[in-house]
Amino acid sequence: MNGGHSGFNALNGGWQAGSGFGAAGERATFWTSTETGTNSAWVMGTNGSGSKVEMVNTAAKVCGFSVRCVKD
């Protein structure tokens, strides 16, 4: 995903859940800091075309998504 106006660039790293991996090369997915419970949190990711980032869903914290570090 190219940064466009925001300058945010991301590689489509996909995700890991259970014993499998998915969407590698197709989507970029990231944890957010918003927990929905002790064992789950919101995930953001690129849409299918990679033209925008949107809230995807909540996921169990045992799943694997990318992390984006932001410097204040």
Image (cartoon, helix red, strand yellow):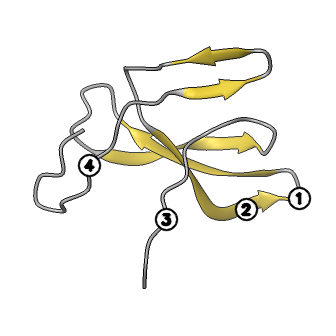
Residue 47's disc is none
In percent of width and height, residue 46 lies at: 36, 38
User: Tag 4: residue type?
Assistant: Asn
In the image, 60 versus 8, the foreground residue is 8
Instruction: Left or right? Give the position of 67 relative to 26.
Output: right
Label 1 – label 2 distance at C-alpha: 7 Å
In percent of width and height, residue 67 lies at: 55, 52
Q: Which residue is mark 3?
A: 69
| Front of the two marks 3 and 1 | 3
Q: At 48% across and 19% down in the image, what residue appears? A: 23
Q: At 32% across and 25% down in the image, what residue appears? A: 48
Label 3 – label 1 distance at C-alpha: 22 Å
Label 2 – label 3 distance at C-alpha: 17 Å
Mark 4 and mark 1 lie on one chain; the one further toward the N terminus is 4
Q: At 50% across and 27% down in the image, what residue appears? A: 14
Q: Residue furthest left?
A: 5
Instruction: Left or right? Give the position of 19 relative to 3.
Output: right
Instruction: Left or right? Give the position of 49 relative to 67.
Output: left
Are the two marked residues, 1 and 2, in contact with CB atoms closer than 8 angstroms? Answer: yes
| Front of the two marks 2 and 4 | 4
Dot 1, how many residues are within 10 Å of its Cα: few (below 14), some (14-19), or many (20+)?
A: few
Q: Which residue is mark 4?
A: 9
Residue 38's disc is 1
